[in-house]
Amino acid sequence: MGKDRYKIKLYTLSTCSHCIRTKRFFKENDIDMEFTDVDLLTGAERERVMNELRKLNPDCSFPTICIGDDIIVGFNEEKLRKALNLL
Amino acid sequence: MTPERLFEILSKYAESQGIRLNKDTPFVMDILQGLLTNEQRYGYRSCPCRLAWGVKDKDADIVCPCVYRDPDIKEYGSCFCGLYVSIAWNEGKMEHRQVPERRPRGKRLV
C-alpha cells in the first residue's frame, strides 16, 4: 500500500488536543509514524528539533505532519487521508 | 484542580460570556488536562496548543483565554484550540473549519 512507502514524522506538543487527535488518527488507521513532543524537549535538543521544524513549517505550529514530501499543518483529516491514499 | 472541576468552572464561565465549551467533551478534557499541565509547568495556564516561552510576560497573550479567542470565535466560531466556541458552532450551524494561527509571528517561539 502507498502509505507504507512514506516515512511519517510528526512534530507535536504533549498538551495539544489537535496533536492528540492526530496521533490517534495514525494509531486508529494502523499507520506507523514517529512523533516528537517539542514541549518536552529542553536545551540543545529542543533547538535542534525547532531548527528542523522551522525548515518544514516556518510558523512552527503544531501539529506539523510530514508524509514523504507532503507537509500538513494542523489536524485536517481530509488532507491526511489524501496524503496517505486513504480516501 | 482536576480537569473535571475545571470543566464545571469553565462551562459556567463560557455561558456567562455568551459562548460555550466545545460539545465534544472528550476533546475538551484533553485541552483542560493540557492547561493544567502547563499551569504546573509554568505557573500559569498557557495555551496547550502553542509552544510557550515559559516566561509569563512573553506568554501573556496566550494565557487561556488567549487574546485571540474572541476574534477567532467571531470569524470561525471557535478558538484556535477548539475549547471555546460559539453557540452556532456547537449547534452545527456553521462550518467546523481549521482555525489558522492569529498570533503574530513576532510573538511566537519559532
Image: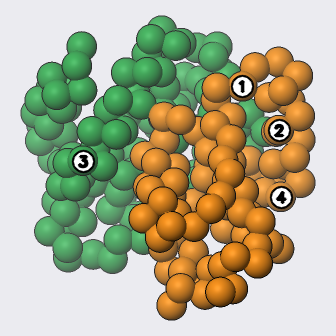
Q: Residue furthest bottom?
A: A87
The letter of the orange chain is: A
Is circle 1 on the same chain as circle 3?
A: no
Q: Viewed as shown, does residue A59 lie left or right of A17?
A: right
Amino acid type of disc 1?
A: Leu
Element under disc 4: helix
x, y percentage for residue A51?
89, 41
Instruction: In the rendered structure, find residue B87 and report the number of the disc placed on it.
Output: none
Disc 2 packing (10 Å; few <14; some 14–19; many ≥20): some
Tags 2 and 1 in contact by the CB under 8 Å rule? Answer: yes
Q: Which residue is mark 4?
A: A56
Q: Viewed as shown, does residue B18 lie left or right of A42?
A: left
* Nearest to viewer (mark 4 / mark 2): 2
Q: Residue at x 42, y 64 (%)?
A: A28
x, y percentage for residue A26?
52, 63
Q: Nearer the viewer, residue A57 or A65?
A: A65
x, y percentage for residue A82?
59, 85
Amino acid type of disc 2?
A: Val
Q: Which residue is mark 1?
A: A41
Disc 4 chain ID: A
Amino acid type of disc 4?
A: Leu
Q: Which residue is mark 3?
A: B26
User: Which colour is chain B painted?
Assistant: green
